[in-house]
Image (cartoon, rainbow, N blue to C red):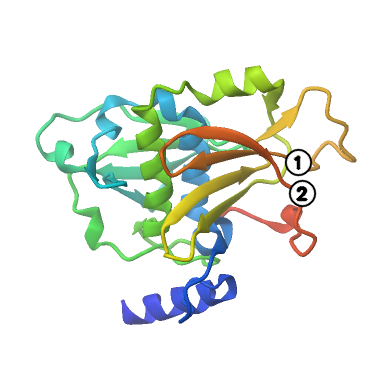
C-alpha cells in the first residue's frame, strides 16, 4: 500500500498536488485515474437521473460522501455488447436487496454498467494508472470526490445539464477527446471540476470533427452546473489521452 501511495504522490507532484506549499492548482483526472475518469464521464452528465440506490449521502459541512466504486476484473456478463463493469458498495447495499444494474454511456463509444454489491470495496487496492488491470481495484478518492458532487447535484433544484445546454444552444459531443480537470484552491478545498470535450456549440466552427470546443461544462462544489469558455492548453495533446480499464 505504501508503494502505491508513493507512486501516486510522485505522479501528482507534476500537478502540484503533493507540494509542501499550499497553492491553487489543477489535476487532470485522466492521468491519475483513467478508470475513474471513464466512470465520471458516464455519471456526471446524467447526475439528475441517478438511481435512488446511488444517491445515499452523508454531508458534513460542505462535503458530500457517497459509497465506494471499484472497477471489476471482468466485463459485464449477459450482453452482446462489451460493457466495462463497475461495482458500487454503500451502507444501503447491506440493508436492501439487490438492485437492477445501472447501464450508462460514457460518450466515448464505451458503455459501462454499475452493479450493487455488499463486498467491502474500501479494502481493495487503488487502481494504478497506465497499467493493464489484473484484478478488481477501487477508484481513487479524487474520483469519489468528483462523483460526490454529482450526488449533490442530484439533490439540487437548479435543473439538469440538458436544460442548461438547451438554454445555451449547446449539444453533447461524442467525437472530441475528453478531459476531466479538478481545481483546488490554496486551502486544498475542491473548487470545481471542468469537463472538457463533452459539449460543443450547435453552430460552432471547429478545425476538425474531433476538435475540442471552447465551451466547457463546469460542476461547482455546490453541485451546480455552469458553462464556461476555456481555451485548449497548448502543452496537452488531448488526442493522445487513452482510457484503460477494459
* C-alpha span from label 2 to label 1: 6 Å
Q: Is 83 situated left or right of 60 in this image?
A: right
Which residue does the image show at 42% across and 53% down from the upper left?
A: 143
User: Do we see residue 96 in this rendering?
Assistant: yes
In the rendered image, which residue does mark 1 sit on?
A: 214
Q: Is residue 93 above or below residue 135?
A: above
In the rendered image, which residue does mark 2 sit on?
A: 231
Q: Is residue 212 above or below residue 139?
A: above
Q: Can you tell which quarter of the image residue 93 is in?
A: top left
- SS category of the residue bearing label 1: loop
Q: Can you tell which quarter of the image residue 128 is in?
A: bottom left
Residue 71 in percent (x, y) is at: 39, 51
Are the residues at dot 2 and dot 1 in contact (C-beta closer than 8 Å)? yes
Q: Is 225 situated left or right of 179 in this image?
A: left
Q: Is 126 situated left or right of 42 in this image?
A: left
Q: Is residue 136 above or below residue 51?
A: below
Amino acid at each position: 500500500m505504501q508503494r502505491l501511495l508513493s507512486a501516486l504522490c510522485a505522479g501528482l507532484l507534476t500537478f502540484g498536488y503533493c507540494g509542501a506549499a499550499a497553492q491553487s492548482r489543477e489535476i487532470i483526472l485522466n492521468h491519475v485515474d483513467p478508470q475513474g475518469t471513464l466512470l465520471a464521464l458516464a455519471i456526471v452528465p446524467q447526475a439528475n437521473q441517478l438511481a435512488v440506490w446511488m444517491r445515499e449521502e452523508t454531508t458534513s459541512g460542505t462535503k458530500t460522501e457517497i459509497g465506494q466504486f471499484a472497477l471489476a476484473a471482468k466485463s459485464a456478463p449477459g450482453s452482446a455488447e462489451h460493457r466495462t463493469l463497475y461495482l458500487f458498495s454503500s451502507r444501503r447495499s447491506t440493508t436492501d436487496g439487490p438492485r437492477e444494474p445501472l447501464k450508462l454511456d460514457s460518450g466515448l463509444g464505451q458503455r459501462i454498467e454499475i452493479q450493487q454489491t455488499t463486498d467491502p470495496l474500501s479494502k481493495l487496492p487503488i487502481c494504478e494508472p497506465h497499467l493493464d488491470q489484473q484484478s478488481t481495484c477501487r477508484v481513487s478518492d479524487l474520483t469519489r470526490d468528483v462523483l460526490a458532487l454529482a450526488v449533490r447535484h442530484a439533490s439540487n433544484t437548479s435543473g439538469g445539464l440538458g436544460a442548461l445546454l438547451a438554454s445555451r444552444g449547446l449539444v453533447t459531443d461524442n467525437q472530441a477527446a475528453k478531459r476531466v480537470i479538478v481545481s483546488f484552491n490554496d486551502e486544498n478545498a475542491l473548487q470545481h471540476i471542468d469537463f472538457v470535450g463533452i459539449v460543443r456549440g450547435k453552430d460552432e466552427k471547429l478545425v476538425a470533427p474531433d476538435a475540442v470546443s471552447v465551451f466547457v461544462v463546469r460542476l461547482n462544489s455546490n453541485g451546480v452546473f455552469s458553462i464556461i469558455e476555456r481555451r485548449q492548453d497548448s502543452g496537452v495533446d488531448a488526442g493522445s489521452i487513452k482510457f484503460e480499464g477494459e
